[in-house]
Image (cartoon, rainbow, N blue to C red):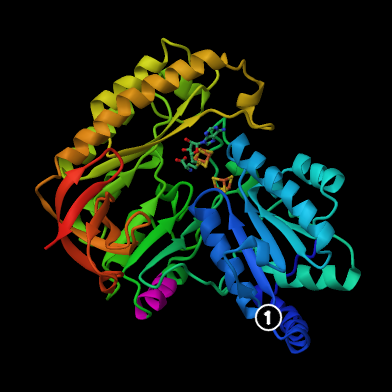
Amino acid sequence: MNYKDDSGFAGQLAYIEKVREANLTFFEKEGRKKKAHILTFGCQMNAHDSEKIKGMFEEMGYVLTEKEEEADFVIYNTCCVRENAENKVYGNLGFLKHRKESQPNLKIALCGCMMQQPTVIETIRKKYKFVDIVFGTFNLYKLPELIVRNEESGSPIFDIWKEHGDIVEDIPEIRKCDFKASVNIMYGCNNFCTYCIVPYVRGRERSRKPEDIIKEIEALTQKGCIEVTLLGQNVNSYGKGLEEKVSFAELLRQINDIEGLKRIRFMTSHPKDLSDELIEIMAECEKVCPHLHLPFQAGNNEILKNMNRNYTKEKYLSLIAKIKERIPHIAITTDIMVGFPGEGREEIKDTLDIIENVGFAGAFTFIYSKRTGTPAANMEQVDGAIVKENFNDVLSAVNPKILAFNQKKVGKVYEVLADDVSAQDPSFLTGRTADNSLVHFKAGKEDIGSIVNVKITDCKTFYLMGEKI
Ligand code: SAH
Ligand code: SF4
Ligand code: F3S
């Protein structure tokens, strides 16, 4: 059943009020507020969606808790990009089943990318009958309504849309911190890389209007935000389909003018759409961080073609050369996938070649995971032992390169935005340089949220050590 309507988030206000009243009654009776716990899997897109879910929970009168075991309402925002992400969700649901048996009032909801797959919904209906509410990526703003419908009907509610509706603005949000924020600039993806499930579960590419984005960032900076990360699966194709055509580079220039904002980051860029205009704007705009996340996935041209990536090894390398020439101090990070169909011991050499050539500052490495419904799932899969060998070769090639990149920083001073107290040692803070290196440095809590000068004293593969000066 589809409850699509045109009222956007305004249509939810009455439901929010209803839940809030019910929660108030609970509070008056029990002497405590209902607690909600949200567990997020997957990428920054999902993390940002969870901020909206948290905002709605707060509006409905719940208090948020980090502890699942004390929650009255548990919601999982799921990811399906790789099989292990899905397995974690099923594993957790196994535990929740026991809790629901001893605590029948516990509410359990599932949302996010995994729920957009009909096979997953079938599994939940059959094997996880205790789940109360299930919704997808296109209708998350309807959570208050779904809670009311579940409450009133006393039966599980499944509400999954096959396609996106209009972009819904003004959903309340609870952001992790005041000084840093993620901002969606677009949703969905049209690229259909043959291994990837994202276009199927996040729908077609659509861009938010520049004025809505600017308005949101201005409001954030007024509340003390100094760093924004602009989110999209393929930010370089931002603006297509908007009435008034605006390129990603132009959008960056406009955001660069926002007073009070100090750093602008973005992810992810696709090599096929990276324009000269963007390189120029990155070089000119002082707030745009000198960091580019540019996934290449694989180096072999046949593999790249079968992945539908629309570039070659040579094109990727010449793009990198062009960027480095214009912005010599740029840090380039990437995603590498190992084990795509057809990638044997010979083909991986091209991936190793790219690693050798580029000098990445960081890399996320993944083993290819077969996703039902994608074209690559029907291709002949690579033997696991070969994948393992190739993966080890990739790690052995990339890690020393990252270390070498970090070593060049030792002895120099960098501006670091202090994020948090270090998890290992409370007398240390952790933060990021403009070019996105993770730094641990000795300083007091009062520096959290500020940009401080840090001299780099030592480095490891995945972080730098430093001293505040
Ligand atoms: N839109 C981004 C990436 C989103 S998914 C881009 O195109 O760069 C993040 C990363 O997950 C991808 O870059 C890819 O390396 C990895 N990934 C996607 N599908 C995968 C699969 N089926 N198996 C393993 N890794 C995958
Ligand atoms: Fe997936 Fe490719 Fe789209 Fe990235 S660009 S989300 S890898 S289909
Ligand atoms: Fe992100 Fe996973 Fe969905 S990577 S877009 S949460 S499938």
Q: Does the residue tagged 1 have its C-beta within 8 Å of any atom of ligand 3? A: no
| Numbered disc total | 1
The reply to whether residue 253 is in sight is no
Return the x and y of residue 265 as percentages of the image width and height.
Answer: 34, 56
Please tell me in which quadrant of the rendered image residue 80 appears: top right
The correct choice, above or below, for 381 with respect to 423 in the image is above
Return the x and y of residue 364 as percentages of the image width and height.
Answer: 41, 37
Image quadrant occupied by the C terminus: bottom left
Image quadrant occupied by the N terminus: bottom right
| Secondary structure predominantly adopted by residues drawn in magenta | helix
The reply to whether residue 322 is in sight is yes
Return the x and y of residue 162 as percentages of the image width and height.
Answer: 73, 50
Q: In this rendered view, identify the residue nearer to me: 367 or 293.
A: 367
Seen at 84% across and 64% down, the residue is: 104
Q: Is residue 9 left or right of residue 239?
A: right
Q: Is residue 205 left or right of residue 272?
A: right
Q: Secondary structure at mark 1?
A: loop
The correct choice, above or below, for 394 with respect to 413 in the image is above
Q: Which residues are magenta?
A: 214-222
464 magenta-colored: no
State the residue position of label 1.
33
Q: In this rendered view, identify the residue nearer to me: 38 or 13.
A: 38
Seen at 53% across and 14% down, the residue is: 385
Q: In this rendered view, identify the residue nearer to me: 174 or 253.
A: 174
Amino acid at circle 1: Lys
Return the x and y of residue 246 as percentages of the image width and height.
Answer: 40, 59
The correct choice, above or below, for 25 with respect to 140 in the image is below
The correct choice, above or below, for 281 with respect to 183 in the image is above
Q: In this rendered view, identify the residue nearer to me: 285 or 363.
A: 363
Q: Looking at the image, which residue sits at the far top?
A: 346
